[in-house]
Amino acid sequence: MLKKLKEQYANENKQFTLITKAGLVLESDQAIFNIPANSSIFEFHPFFESLPTEHMGKEELNFFCIHLTLKDEIYIVDIKVIPKEEGLLLIFYDLTSHYNTYQSITQTRNESVIKTELTVIKNKELVERERFKNRFIQNFSHELRNPLTSIMAILGLLCDTKLTYEQEKMLDFLKESNTNLRLMLEDTLSIGMIDAGKLNIRNSVFDLHKLIELLDFTYKAKAKAKGLNFECSWDDKLPKYLEGDRLRLFQVVTNILDNALKYTKNGGINFSVVLNQKRANLVNIRFEVADTGLGIAKENQNKIFESFNQVQSNEIRKGVGLGLTIAKKLLELMGSSIKMESTLGEGSRFYFDINIPYILFPKSISNTKSKSKDKNSKQLEKKYKILLVEDDAYVQTTLFKVLLKTNRFKINLVYDGSLVFQEVVNNNYDLILMDVNLPNISGNQITKLIRDFPFKNVKNVPIVGITANALQKDIDQYLEAGMQKVLIKPFENEELLQTIFTLLK
Amino acid sequence: MLKSKKIVVLGHFGVGKTSLIRRFVTNTFSDNYKVTIGVHITKKVIEISAEDKVSLILWDLEGTDDIVSIRNSYLLGTHGAIFVFDVSRPSTFQQLSSDLAILNEKLPKVPLMIVGNKADLVSEVEVKALFEKYALKVDFLTSAKTGKTVNELFLNLALLLTADA
Ligand SMILES: Nc1nc2c(ncn2[C@@H]2O[C@H](COP(=O)(O)OP(=O)(O)OP(=O)(O)O)[C@@H](O)[C@H]2O)c(=O)[nH]1
Ligand SMILES: [Mg+2]
């Protein structure tokens, strides 16, 4: 009994077939599939047609996981081929269900490996594209600076010529557009710099009360011009002196205020500064700007802080500058974050809380400004000798004209770095105005050379750098090389003159 | 006379070996990926000339990321080989030269075609850049999806094999 059963199960899933070397089927037990005797095994499946008969000596061969499709049924089998006197003995092992399990495991594994690889590739592409785009925008903005500087300088000059009323109006318009363009350019570059981690926060002691008064004064005027109300309120418990980055804080608040002005047609703007908390040497202050403007729908509230980096299809972003984006990013640099509440049609409230160290008695917040002003106006009667070093012909002529117009300067001009040194040694200049990127030798190097010179009249001549390069680390380098001041293109004529007069003491 | 030639198709998994054979044999294509395990064997008889036909026995092998692990029994009696990689996935051709060296050992003197498949997924410019970057030498750029140069690939190999004999 057991013998019979054993035979039955031992033979399950196993088929024995005997063929001649020429492929004629001699005998087959048909345990799995039917291979008729006296037929050609080659007809049965192409596998047999490619059996390597030349390798068939006495050795047996094993083939694993062979798919045999017979009458729409798939068998996955291992095949043993054993040379015998009569020809070849084929033993088939039907392992279909075993191999199907293996298949589904492999399927899962392969799919996930491929998916991962493709995701990595795609992400890399996205990052690369994003980087390319940002670099492009940065370079492009950078390139715009030179022509814009010329336009602004020439506009300044044009305004001082005889003009009809209409021409004056047109010029005003041009000037304003140009200023907007310049501001946009600066915003774009700022964002690029913040993103690239190149913008540093510089803390120093400043007078908070004065800062608020300045904002109050400036925005009262701006609001009035638009027929709006401007209310400024602040806690009198606020400390006077803080140690923080005044410039960046100012930038954040003005960006928020400008945004409020832009979107308020009726009513007004409330600006308040409140002391939240005071600890040993740290205060937490809330700055808040509330307007009665358009308001922003809930679903759009996050998007208004996005820069051109993100896809924007929303109406609301039309014409919005980059101000809020910058405010948000700057606040992040200062460890704070901008928040907003808004109701469509009623208005918005922007605010942030910021921790800043405060100081009770500052060592020196000097008040020398008014003094030096008097001094300047007296001394400015005499004519100063200025050397202008600039290779760009447009910038050259426009700067030249701006300086000449004041009637305070005698100006010499060189366009090549290598000519500067000789010029400086042979003339007693009161100031050098120098482009940093010059042919042959950089303004930076020239400055170092001049500062190393043994004679005082040469060694100490004030040098003002001009550059289209707004990277802080580069500017620091120029200052380190010995420039007194670096002007970033494009700049206003007044800024230039102011800088020069301040240095000519 | 009808000659039989065994051709093995190998390469990393998912590069389109099964798809290339399916395109050649039945002129169809599917976007679904069904992993091949072990080997599928199909046959296609093609006419070389008016009186000369050849029966191509195509061995569609399980894809591996390691050529060494291919079972030697599958390669016995091979007349020609096709190594396929996927032009859209660098991992399938990054070690091409070492893969080919191993193949050369396993299949000495067997004619081999190197095929970059899925050509429809990348632009010609990108392909060129890839080939330069990885110093790839490729016999055919194919697409099982569009059918591009699939027949040419198999016919060329068939001609090569019958001329040899
Ligand atoms: N776009 C495109 N997709 C292809 C092409 N060839 C194959 N595919 C797709 O790629 C996937 C894998 O194709 P297969 O032919 O199964 O790949 P394989 O090399 O046989 O894979 P394994 O059997 O696992 O080694 C499938 O989803 C196919 O649809 C092609 O030329 N173009
Ligand atoms: Mg396959």
Image (cartoon, coloured by chain):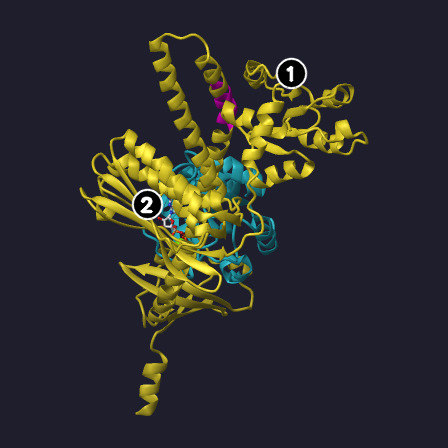
Q: Chain of mark 1?
A: A
Q: Which residues are magenta?
A: A143-151
**Residue at (27, 30) in percent of width and height:** A226
The kind of residue on which mark 1 rests is: Ile
Res A70 quadrant in image: bottom left
**Residue at (36, 47) in percent of width and height:** B22
- Nearest-to-viewer mark from 2 and 1: 1
* The chain in yellow: A
Q: Sort mark 1 into few (<14), some (14-19) or many (20+) by Cα contacts within 10 Å.
A: some
In this picture, residue B101 sits left or right of residue B17: right
Mark 2 secondary-structure assignment? loop
Mark 1 secondary-structure assignment? strand
Q: Pick the residue in front: A138 or A378.
A: A378
Q: Pick the residue in front: B43 or B135.
A: B135
Task: Specify whether tag 2 is near ligand 1 (CB below 8 Å).
Answer: yes
How far across and how far down the image is residue A64, in percent? 44, 66
How far across and how far down the image is residue A337, in percent? 38, 53
Q: Which residue is mark 2?
A: B29
In the rendered view, tell whether residue A34 sits above or below residue A185: below
The kind of residue on which mark 2 rests is: Phe
In the rendered view, tell whether residue A168 sits above or below residue A177: above
Which quadrant: the N terminus of chain B? Answer: top left
**Residue at (60, 17) in percent of width and height:** A408
> What is the number of the mark on residue B55?
none
Q: Report the predominant secondary structure element of the magenta stretch.
A: helix
Q: Is residue B83 visible?
A: no
Quadrant containing ligand 2 reads bottom left
Is the same chain shared between marks 2 and 1?
Answer: no
Q: CA distance from mark 2 to mark 1?
A: 78 Å
How far across and how far down the image is residue A316, in percent? 26, 38
